[in-house]
Image (cartoon, helix red, strand yellow):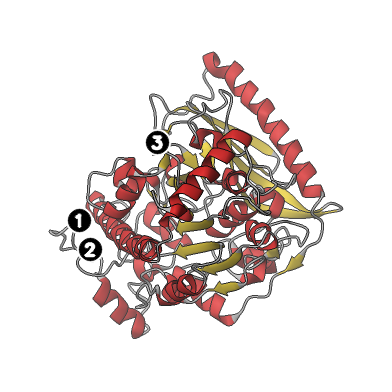
Amino acid sequence: MSSTAARWLAFGLALAAFGLGGCGAGAPEKPNVVVISLDTLRADALGAYGESRATSPTFDRFASGAVVFDHAFSQAPMTAPSHMTLFTSLYPSVHRVNNLGAEGNRAQGKSGDVPAQWRVDPNTTTLAELFRSAGWRTAAFHGGGNVNKSVGFDDGFEWFDGKPQNGMNGNADRPFDFTRAAAWIDEHADEPFFLFLHTYVPHAPYVPPAPWDRAFDPDYAGPIPYRDAFLAAVQRGEPGPPPPGDGASAARKRMLRHTPWQFWGYVDPDSAREVQHVRALYAGDVRTTDDALATMLAKLADAGLDERTIVVVLSDHGEGFLEHGVFEHPGKLYRELVHVPLALRVPGLAPARVAAPVGLIDVAPTLCELVGLPTPASMQGRSFAGELRGSPAPATRAVWSEFVPRWRDSEAGFVPLDLLRARRDARWTYLATLKDGVLVEELYDRSVDPGETRDLAALPEHEARRLAFRAELEAEERACAAARAKLTTQSAGELEQSTLDDLKQLGYAR
């Protein structure tokens, strides 16, 4: 056993025995922490989560040596609110950070009910701030877009690199480039660091590079363009096929109202063959993302950092393929949009699969416990470090997700006007939609209906369960309202032109 491995074993034993670690004289060496976010990656697109196609050999190898959570859920179906929850362990209705773009046009003040894209309250403590204040070096290399400094994602990071080459999606000919991140790792290899790596590669439009553009549907001969033809049209400034006329299906019209038609204009949502091919293109992008993950993990290994680095691989949200009538990830909370991969490789801890549900909101307090940092009382998540070490999860554990489509101005600052919430435990999914003061409830039994397609909320035999979940919903809102009341400083983030350009590339702005 190497001296580094021995120190790590001692560190792990200390954590297991006492639940914390120290950083003073004689204390175990501070571990590095690397969080890798693969944007828009639904869990079941990976082999480790059941995908039969060869989309993820790298992730699957990583998962075989990690603790994998089978039922991890994001707290929002969109990039900005989900990542801010990851960094702050606050629910989206509390930290108030929204995506720009599809709802961002309204978020920039074109509707009186919706505020601008608010910067996170300066009194909020982010994960990067915690690590930096405790002596870790901190850096982020991300794909830009909705992960931008205008809303506070840079808080706590000494280096915040949002170059599109870090992982923009296929809407531009910008290949993944790990050069800058690799150089930063080399420069700080002898210091403890907290590193955030993020890529949008699997995000729509799905135009993966060869050979993954044809790998999963080689016989397709329809109108959806492959990468070269698509990029050529973009470079010529061609908008794609015109919007459908009056004779087009309602599904096609609905889709094109909510998505840029430079890619989606070629897709007929009423054609099973077209949808099949779209999913194959997404699978190709997932494989492209997996190749990027291989580059990231190889760099850590080549630098000799594996034995003293906690590595977390996750996604911020999933992606829809008409399971509930939508492509991409609009403001809904069904399983395909919030079930995400989550795997942690912690030196000294044995690989395992954990069936208990957890949320991305739980990642920050878990990392705090693992490295011995005090967890801020403001964090709403709960550490799952015990499950990492093999302890059983609390039998009552449930995970909440949220989406806030509209806000209103009040004496307490901006508060949700409309609100969607989802509660998931090991078996049940409870969805609650509050719109214009009317509450609509849905109830699904995932033990027999994993795709959440058979709503049981109206059945008399489930009334007691639905009412019990409603009581939990009301308690959840009270807790969020109390947390929100402590964060009253609001300022609108000012977007740089490069961020707006990125949002156009991602399809959020036109």
Three-letter code for the amino acid on which mark 3 is drawn: Ala
Q: Residue furthest top?
A: 461
Three-letter code for the amino acid on which mark 2 is drawn: Trp
Kindly report the distance in space between the C-alpha atoms of the residues bearing marks 3 and 2: 31 Å
* Picture residue at 35% right of the left edge, 54% below the top: 249
- Bin the neighbour count of mark 3 within 10 Å (Cα to Cα): few under 14, some 14-19, many 20 and up: some
**Who is closer to the viewer here, 377 or 81?**
377
- Bin the neighbour count of mark 1 within 10 Å (Cα to Cα): few under 14, some 14-19, many 20 and up: many
Q: What element carries label 3?
A: strand
Three-letter code for the amino acid on which mark 1 is drawn: Phe
Q: Mark 2 points at which residue?
A: 212
Q: Which residue lies furthest to the left in this view?
A: 219
Residue 305 seen from this side:
yes
- Bin the neighbour count of mark 2 within 10 Å (Cα to Cα): few under 14, some 14-19, many 20 and up: many
Q: Pointer 3 and pointer 1: residues touching (CB < 8 Å)?
A: no
Is residue 278 left or right of 27 when viewed as pictured? left
* Picture residue at 48% right of the left edge, 44% below the top: 9
Does 257 appear above or below 362?
below
Q: Is mark 2 on a helix, strand or loop?
A: loop
Is residue 162 left or right of 216 when viewed as pictured? right
Q: Pointer 3 and pointer 2: residues touching (CB < 8 Å)?
A: no
**Who is closer to the viewer here, 29 or 137?**
29
**Coordinates of residue 22 in the picture (x, y in percent):** 65, 48
**Who is closer to the viewer here, 495 or 13?**
13
Kindly report the distance in space between the C-alpha atoms of the residues bearing marks 1 and 2: 7 Å
Q: Pointer 1 and pointer 2: residues touching (CB < 8 Å)?
A: yes
Res. 216 mark? 1
- Quarter assignment of residue 244: bottom left
* Picture residue at 84% right of the left edge, 51% below the top: 412
Does 180 appear above or below 447?
below
Q: Mark 3 points at which residue?
A: 352
**Coordinates of residue 446 in the picture (x, y in percent):** 43, 28
